[in-house]
Image (cartoon, helix red, strand yellow):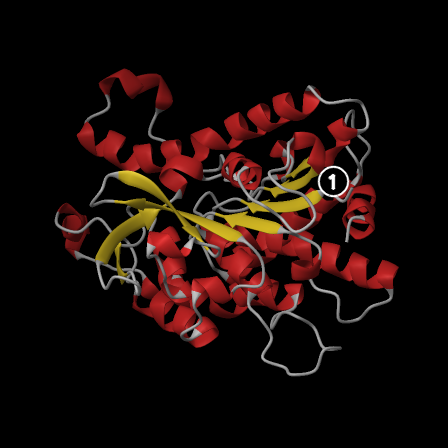
């Protein structure tokens, strides 16, 4: 019986270059092995989950091609084009959109550091009026709904009775609205014309792998219904978090409200990443020896995280540093570890389960 193949992509702003670098390698390796130049990431995963920059990447991989020819690729974008997106547009989204105020007084009234106008323009350029349900595979993207005060999962395969439909560009604007970076996203549910006010899903699931696992358990896939862990292949890719700056930690007992206010978003968004990895490893460690290898987490080794601590730094120098970090993540992923396939072995598993 074929296994359900799951791809999970962390949040992390410009650090999305890291998983994009890994997935460019994965796609190229699949093309090399299968000798199919039209093979795409969307062909080899059955469910994709993403938060923030991971949601944007997932949408790139799952955007359908408009071609009418069966032999052409099913998806519009190559993995290399998703990677190029950061080099091409990152500076306009972040550095060129930064707000400035007199002696920082602006932040007393509006804490968002960046204008969302360029991000919204670019998302419209890339995805136009593509509906979430048009994505090629089941996809979940996280956000937090400020009105209902609940986590919310955008799903490309919503039951009709839920009355939910959204533009992909609005979903991505929502999942990218990181507190203190971009203002909340005001979007419309196309099925009901009701407004939602959303912020980045990273406030509760910056690593959405457990969300993906739970979604898969409740999904009736073509080859297997409601799969258990033994029926899954899970590839989870991080963005090299933990690089943010904090005020003097040994004086944290005396932090004022401004120190806490500027630190909490990063602490919250980074804190769950390793926890989810720990939980997933514990789930797969309960399986037989062969199936323990079916969960793989890829991230930049902690001693190789030499890029900027600012996840919005889109300077040419930091873009190159992040690409180097992606290559370090690839190098580490190829090493043989206990209860884990090397990346090439995992790719072979993806192909065998196609």
Q: Can the viewer see residue 299?
A: yes
133 vs 317, nearest the viewer: 133
Residue at 29% x, 60% y is 189
Q: Is residue 162 above or below residue 203?
A: below
Count neighbours of disc 1 (C-alpha within 10 A) and say few if under 14, some if 14 to 19, many if 20 or more.
many
- Residue to which mark 1 is pinned: 333
Q: Is residue 36 above or below residue 185?
A: below
Q: Is residue 9 above or below residue 287?
A: below
70 vs 60, nearest the viewer: 70
Q: Where is residue 237 shown, x and y percent of the image?
A: 61, 43
Q: Can the viewer see residue 321?
A: no
Indicate the quadrant where residue 206 lies: top left
Q: Where is residue 229 shown, x and y percent of the image?
A: 65, 31
Residue at 30% x, 58% y is 114
Residue at 78% x, 22% y is 288
174 vs 319, nearest the viewer: 174
- Toward the front, the furthest residue is 161
Does residue 86 appear left or right of residue 188 in this picture?
Answer: right
Assign a secondary structure to mark 1: helix
Indicate the quadrant where residue 163 lies: bottom left
Does residue 70 appear left or right of residue 248 in this picture?
Answer: right
């Amino acid at each position: 019986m074929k296994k359900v193949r799951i791809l999970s992509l962390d949040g992390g702003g410009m650090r999305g270059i890291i998983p994009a670098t890994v997935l460019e390698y994965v796609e190229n390796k699949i093309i090399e092995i299968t000798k199919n130049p039209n093979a795409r990431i969307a062909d080899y995963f059955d469910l994709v989950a993403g938060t923030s920059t991971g949601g944007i990447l997932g949408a790139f991989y799952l955007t359908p091609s408009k071609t009418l020819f069966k032999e052409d690729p099913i998806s519009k974008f190559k993995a290399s084009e998703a990677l190029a997106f950061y080099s091409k547009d990152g500076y306009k989204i972040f550095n060129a959109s930064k707000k400035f105020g007199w002696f920082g007084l602006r932040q007393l009234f509006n804490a968002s550091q960046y204008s969302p106008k360029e991000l919204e323009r670019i998302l419209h350029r890339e995805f136009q009026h593509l509906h979430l349900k048009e994505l090629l595979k089941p996809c979940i993207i996280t956000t937090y709904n400020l009105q209902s005060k609940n986590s919310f999962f955008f799903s490309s395969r919503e039951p009709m009775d839920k009355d939910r439909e959204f533009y992909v560009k609005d979903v991505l604007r929502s999942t990218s609205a990181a507190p203190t970076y971009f203002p909340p996203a005001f979007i419309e549910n196309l099925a009901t014309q009701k407004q939602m006010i959303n912020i980045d899903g990273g406030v509760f699931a910056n690593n959405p792998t457990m969300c993906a696992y739970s979604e898969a358990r409740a999904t009736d896939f073509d080859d297997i219904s409601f799969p258990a862990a033994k029926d899954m292949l899970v590839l989870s890719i991080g963005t090299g978090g933990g690089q943010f700056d904090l005020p003097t930690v040994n004086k944290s007992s005396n932090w004022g409200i401004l120190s806490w206010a500027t630190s909490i978003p990063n602490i919250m968004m980074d804190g769950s990443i390793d926890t989810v990895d720990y939980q997933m490893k514990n789930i797969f460690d309960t399986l037989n020896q062969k199936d323990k290898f079916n969960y793989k987490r890829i991230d930049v080794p902690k001693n190789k995280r030499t890029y900027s601590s600012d996840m919005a730094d889109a300077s040419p120098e930091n873009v190159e540093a992040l690409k180097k970090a992606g290559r370090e993540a690839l190098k580490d992923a190829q090493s043989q570890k206990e209860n884990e396939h090397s990346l090439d072995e995992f790719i072979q598993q993806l192909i065998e389960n196609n």
